[in-house]
Image (cartoon, rainbow, N blue to C red):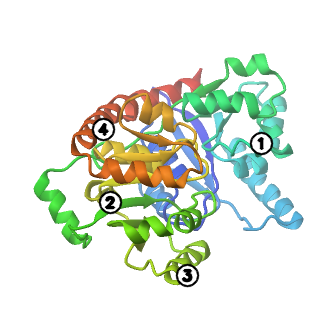
Amino acid sequence: MVKKVVIFVFYQTKSQANGGVNSLWQLIKSFDAISPILITNARTKVVEEAESLGFEVLITTSRDSFSVFARIFNLFFWSSSILKTVIQHRVSAIHFNDIIALSYGVLVAKVLKVFHFRHKLKLIFNIRDVFEPQLAYTKKWKLVNFCDEIIVLSNSMKEQLYLRLPLKNIKYWQDHMHAIYSIVDLERFCPVGEEKQQDIKHQLSLDPTQLHWAYVATFNTKKNQLGFIKELQEELKTHNVIVHFVGDINTYAHKCQTLVKELGLQDKCVFHGYYSSIEDFYRATDLTIVPTKREGLARCMIESLACKGTVVSFDVSSAEEILIANDCGLVVPQGNYELFFEQAYHLSQNKSQMDRFSKNGRNLANQLFSKQAIVASYQNIYLN
């Protein structure tokens, strides 16, 4: 079988942990009917692994700035990379994995589609996040109308974005917006036995007299670590809970560390930085918490469920669809920190409920996040 060529265009930050890129990489390396070509802006572990597997990768010149000059600069070089690749290969589809990549590449892709391929080139946009309800989608999001298909990460995302995106032809998008869950590596993110779990707890120096919550997220305002610490400082001081913050240490993380020191919470908030074996935290802690301002489908949520972890989340996109509908976690109204802490604290001490959630979570992961069906769904969109 001759494989069809698909270009994957995606933007990478400097963080070692990037849920959107990691999700995309799980897809790319699992395709059996597609020959992928990657276009991105940085050499990272994902790029190095792709090259080691023989995939073609183009690192496009790019400036990490949103000035007018930087935008023009990036538009030129990203568009040039796409143009060069399309000229050299018989391309069936171009997949844009984020709004930055879309803004720098979709215009040249649309021109190629109209004048070179005569509508045989399919343009696809993968949306991995949803703005807070009070925030409008700006003019740049009108670029989605240049695409042929939109892929989102859950049914709740699809419902929200269908109403909120600046779509020109609503009837068209009824049939061309698709909800497909993310892949989780179920061999890596899996439960372990009691003895192994105790070994991990020892390695992470988890105090057995305390409850331990994992807060796995990039440090930024969207992920809301600063707000969580500010709002729950008294609860953290007076309860036997330690919160483990796992993510690249950056400027925002330093602000969180400074606040923790000012509030005297050094024994209650532990900053681990980037941790490559993130599954250890899902297995060893009592809960995974998702007190974030917004999500598409929180990767820490579904990875934790795969490890038979238990999750408490604010009512971000997909939380109810995953946790409540499948009886594998709790969802708290957005911004109600006191209730969030109360629910998480009581759940941490309710072994029977935790066991039920854990069992249901792993069963759900096996049903929804295994790669075979997800890969087939993506390939069907690319090739048909």
**Total number of numbered discs in the rendering:** 4
Q: Which of 257/141 is in front?
A: 257
Give the distance between the C-alpha atoms of the residues marked 1 and 3, in whole angstroms: 42 Å
Mark 1 burial class by Cα count in 10 Å: few <14, some 14-19, many 20+? many
Depth-wise, is mark 3 or mark 2 nearer the camera? 3
Label 4: state its secondary structure. helix
- Say which amino acid is labelled 1: Val
Label 3: state its secondary structure. helix
Identify the residue under disc 2.
Answer: 281
Identify the residue under disc 3.
Answer: 258
Query: Which residue is at 34% across, 50% downward?
Result: 346
Identify the residue under disc 4.
Answer: 357
Give the distance between the C-alpha atoms of the residues marked 4 and 2, in whole angstroms: 17 Å
N-terminal label among 4 and 2:
2
Give the image location of residue 209, x and y in percent.
Answer: 22, 68
N-terminal label among 4 and 1:
1
Depth-wise, is mark 4 or mark 1 nearer the camera? 4
Identify the residue under disc 1.
Answer: 106
Depth-wise, is mark 2 or mark 1 nearer the camera? 2
Give the distance between the C-alpha atoms of the residues marked 3 and 2, in whole angstroms: 24 Å
Depth-wise, is mark 1 or mark 3 nearer the camera? 3
Query: Which residue is at 39% across, 42% downward?
Result: 184
Give the image location of residue 53, x and y in percent.
Answer: 41, 52
